């Protein structure tokens, strides 16, 4: 007779718990499977524009070449994942898009969890459903883009923050603190405008803990004002003082030496593009390295770094506990210790993931003073693109290089549909009602969500350069905001009507309000059903074959090609690219549209690729090309209607 194992009851208990957990969230798992199937059916064919750049970067990262192309790349984390995708699936679009796909599906799950935490299971599943069906989000989840990774880490942080606030277990709080630091670091390494969300979190903490912060400032001000404090600390901690001074000098004057040396080796084109991203003071220091202002700038940098290190030490010294001792052994952490622990975790994680770049120290300097400082203050005054400065974008039939402040409202209506527009209006009205009625419990309940939506949205609006996909991490936050507030608003209205206020009728009407949003014209559901094919094939692989064939047939002459995105064309030509081919980039090149037009008129251009883009469809260059092309090759079902025009 075979005896059952002694722990059979424990195993059965674990199985029962697992089954209860699974069936308690069965709706989201079913939704994730359905969405995953739809996404896989729409995986990209030939890559598009910057997708090819990221794929090429990932391939070079695997070879250890971290200085390739954009050596000063401020967003390496998604590229790491794309490199891993190449290891798993080979050098193809599926491998590069695999991890954005995974992060997209996980973002749907986190949207459900956050929506459930802030509302109920119905609001959670509605938010997840609408997000998964939103064409713009689905497109990002099946393409080689950075925004999907960043959106995941924004949601991951918000989810951890809510779990942290609800648990009373000190050990779990420590784990959540560490994970929050990691989430912020990973988000920042995914894309630099994660700073907007970090800034929003900082504002939220300042408002929420304003009383505690004022007490803390008063306490440390009195401590530092003590004439014996600095003398005592320096005398007993000479090592710390020395380290602070050295770090200040290293990050200050070493930064100057490194920046000067790298700047002198950059081409004029790279200088022109990089200088526009520098904050004004740093821009002056770089352009005039021997000026008094430049040296003063780096001296101030030394002092700032020294003071940061020194202030951190004084805070820790005052509490008379080392970081590791109080973090891992203390029974209870005070608020400042929690923040410091999160910052330390963030810094360690950031530096670990940044290690491949540390062979060239100027990367860190570039990060701090161009991408990050420039991002948070909106210094993106000019970037090379079609027509000159800025990104060329279309709004209501008009072309802009620096879109107006209403651009995002237009894009939300045009690209996300009435579900978002009507939902945001109703949710805002309900939020105003909460403020007027002074329902502080509800306001505090949604406080972090309000802040993490409002602050980044304001910062995005005041930036000169505006792109629709900058809003990508806000898509799920919008939907959590919409479903929870529309549900509550519908329930509130029903509860005010005596004949509807009985039993669960208000909740049913709240749910009905969300369902109505889902079936509005141009809603994600309607859009996805009417156009299930996302058209994720750029057709540039076929375009590359056509250009190669043309160049071989005209091997005795230089074949100049104007392409909507020359890098993608070169990516697909690869090593087979003929020596007599020269490419000119239309979207990102430094040659203006007028100069390209003059080259076409003069007969200096042989081939034009991808001129049917909506932003340039009716330009003089396009009209001339269409009228004077000897032949054309139209690539069917390509994303932007890619066409190849042969002019000679």
Image (cartoon, rainbow, N blue to C red):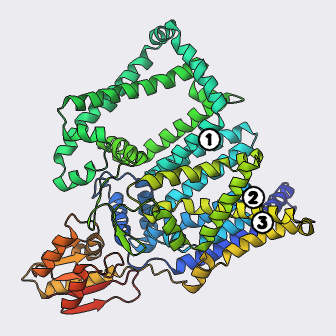
Residue at the spot of label 3: 490
Name above or below for residue 619 compared with residue 291. below
Callout 1: SS: helix
- Image side of residue 132 versus residue 358, left or right: right
Q: Is residue 361 visible?
A: no
**x and y percent of residue 317 in the render?**
55, 19
Give the numbered dot on residue 119. Answer: 2
Front residue (pair 397, 622)? 397
Q: Nearer the viewer, mark 3 or mark 1?
A: 3
Callout 2: SS: loop
- Image side of residue 389 versus residue 604, left or right: right
3D distance between C-alphas at marks 1 and 2: 24 Å
Name above or below for residue 526 compared with residue 16. below
- Image side of residue 52 versus residue 561, left or right: right
Residue at the spot of label 1: 177
Q: Quadrant of residue 636?
A: bottom left
**x and y percent of residue 353 in the render?**
44, 47
Residue at 64% across, 52% down: 449
Name above or below for residue 327 compared with residue 263. above
Callout 2 environment at 10 Å: few (<14), some (14 to 19), or many (20+)?
many
3D distance between C-alphas at marks 3 and 1: 36 Å
Q: Quadrant of residue 387?
A: bottom left
- Image side of residue 593 versus residue 376, left or right: left
- The first of marks 3 and 1 along the sequence is 1
Residue at 67% across, 47% down: 447
**x and y percent of residue 491 in the render?**
81, 64
Q: Nearer the viewer, mark 3 or mark 2?
A: 3
Callout 3: SS: helix
Callout 1 environment at 10 Å: few (<14), some (14 to 19), or many (20+)?
many
């Amino acid at each position: 007779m075979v005896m059952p194992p002694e722990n059979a009851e424990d195993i059965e208990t674990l199985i029962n718990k697992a089954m209860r957990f699974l069936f308690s969230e069965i709706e989201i798992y079913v939704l994730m499977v359905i969405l995953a199937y739809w996404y896989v059916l729409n995986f990209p064919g030939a890559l598009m524009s910057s997708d090819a750049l990221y794929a090429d970067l990932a391939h070079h990262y695997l070879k250890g070449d971290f200085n390739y192309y954009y050596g000063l790349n401020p967003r390496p984390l998604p590229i790491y994942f794309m490199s891993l995708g190449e290891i798993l699936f080979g050098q193809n679009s599926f491998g590069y898009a695999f991890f954005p796909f995974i992060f997209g599906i996980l973002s749907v799950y986190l949207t459900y969890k956050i929506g459930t935490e802030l509302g109920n299971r119905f609001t959670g599943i509605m938010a997840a459903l609408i997000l998964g069906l939103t064409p713009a989000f689905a497109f990002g989840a099946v393409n080689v883009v950075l925004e999907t990774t960043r959106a995941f880490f924004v949601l991951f942080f918000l989810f951890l923050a809510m779990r942290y606030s609800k648990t009373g277990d000190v050990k779990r709080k420590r784990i959540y603190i560490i994970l929050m630091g990691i989430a912020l670091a990973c988000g920042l390494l995914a894309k630099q405008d994660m700073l907007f969300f970090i800034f929003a979190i900082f504002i939220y903490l300042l408002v929420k803990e304003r009383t505690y912060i004022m007490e803390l400032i008063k306490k440390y001000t009195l401590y530092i004002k003590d004439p014996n404090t600095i003398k005592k600390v320096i005398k007993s901690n000479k090592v710390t003082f020395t380290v602070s001074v050295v770090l200040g000098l290293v990050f200050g004057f070493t930064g100057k030496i490194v920046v000067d040396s790298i700047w002198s080796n950059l081409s004029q084109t790279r200088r022109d593009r990089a200088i526009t991203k520098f904050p004004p003071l740093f821009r002056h220091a770089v352009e005039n390295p021997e000026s008094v202002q430049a040296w003063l700038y780096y001296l101030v940098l030394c002092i700032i770094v020294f003071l940061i290190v020194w202030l951190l030490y004084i805070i820790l010294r005052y509490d008379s506990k080392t970081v590791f001792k109080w973090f891992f052994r203390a029974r209870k952490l005070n608020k400042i210790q929690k923040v410091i622990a999160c910052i330390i975790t963030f810094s360690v994680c950031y530096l670990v993931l940044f290690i491949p770049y540390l062979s060239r120290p100027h990367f860190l300097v570039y990060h701090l003073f161009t991408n990050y400082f420039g991002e948070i203050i909106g210094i993106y005054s000019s970037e090379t693109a079609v027509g000159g400065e800025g990104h060329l974008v279309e709004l209501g039939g008009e072309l802009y290089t620096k879109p107006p402040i209403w651009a995002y409202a237009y894009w939300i209506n045009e690209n996300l549909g009435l579900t978002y527009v009507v939902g945001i209006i109703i949710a805002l009205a309900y939020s105003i009602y909460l403020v007027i009625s002074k329902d502080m419990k509800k306001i505090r309940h949604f406080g972090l969500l309000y802040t993490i939506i409002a602050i980044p949205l304001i910062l995005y609006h005041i930036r000169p350069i505006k792109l629709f996909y900058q809003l990508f991490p806000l898509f799920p936050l919008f939907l959590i905001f919409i479903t929870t507030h529309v549900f509550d608003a519908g329930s509130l209205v029903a509860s005010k009507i005596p004949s509807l206020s009985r039993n669960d009728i208000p909740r049913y009407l709240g749910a009905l309000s969300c369902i109505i949003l889902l079936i509005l014209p141009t809603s994600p559901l309607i859009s996805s059903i009417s156009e299930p094919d996302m058209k994720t094939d750029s057709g540039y692989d076929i375009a590359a074959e056509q250009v190669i064939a043309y160049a071989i047939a005209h091997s005795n002459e230089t074949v100049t090609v104007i392409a909507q995105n020359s890098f993608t064309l070169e990516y697909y030509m690869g090593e087979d690219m003929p020596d007599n081919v020269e490419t000119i980039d239309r979207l990102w090149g430094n040659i203006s549209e007028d100069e390209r037009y003059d080259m076409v008129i003069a007969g200096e251009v042989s081939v034009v690729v991808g001129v049917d883009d909506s932003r340039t469809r009716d330009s003089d260059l396009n009209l001339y090309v269409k009228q004077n092309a000897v032949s054309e090759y139209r690539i069917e079902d390509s994303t932007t209607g890619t066409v190849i025009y042969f002019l000679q």
